[in-house]
Image (tube, grey):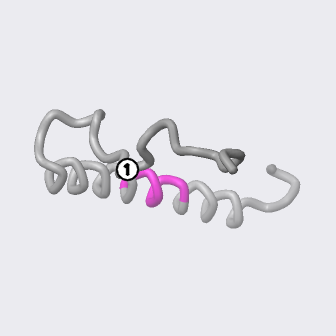
Amino acid sequence: MGFEAIKTEHAGAKNGGGHWGTRADAKTISNHARRVADRAEADRQLRDEERPPSAR
């Protein structure tokens, strides 16, 4: 009939754009930064649990 929606743009992979190097290098750097941030957050949560409720 002609009432179907048509794709006007591609919906392909959206990799890249943030790192001017290989994807493997970008993943290594990103994973390291994520792990550092996760460790810091875990340490922060552990410190909060160790404090008595009156000190929070």
* Residue at x 29%, y 34% (from the top left corner): 18
Residue drawn at x 47%, y 58% is: 38
Q: Is residue 6 above or below residue 52?
A: above
**Residue 27 figure quarter:** bottom left
Q: Is residue 49 magenta?
A: no
Q: Secondary structure at mark 1?
A: loop
Magenta residues: mostly which secondary structure? helix
Residue 25 pos. (x, y %):
14, 50
* Residue appearing at x 69%, y 58% in the figure: 48
Decide: few, some or many residues near mark 1? Use Cα within 10 Å; few <14, some 14-19, many ≥20: few
Q: Position of residue 13 (x, y in %)?
A: 35, 51
Left or right: 50 as drawn, with respect to 43:
right
Compare residues 6 and 37 and report the one nearer the observer.
6
Nearer to me, 20 or 37: 20
Give residue 14's position: percent from left, percent from top.
37, 45
Question: Magenta segment range?
Answer: 36-41
Disc 1 marks a residue whose amino acid type is: Gly
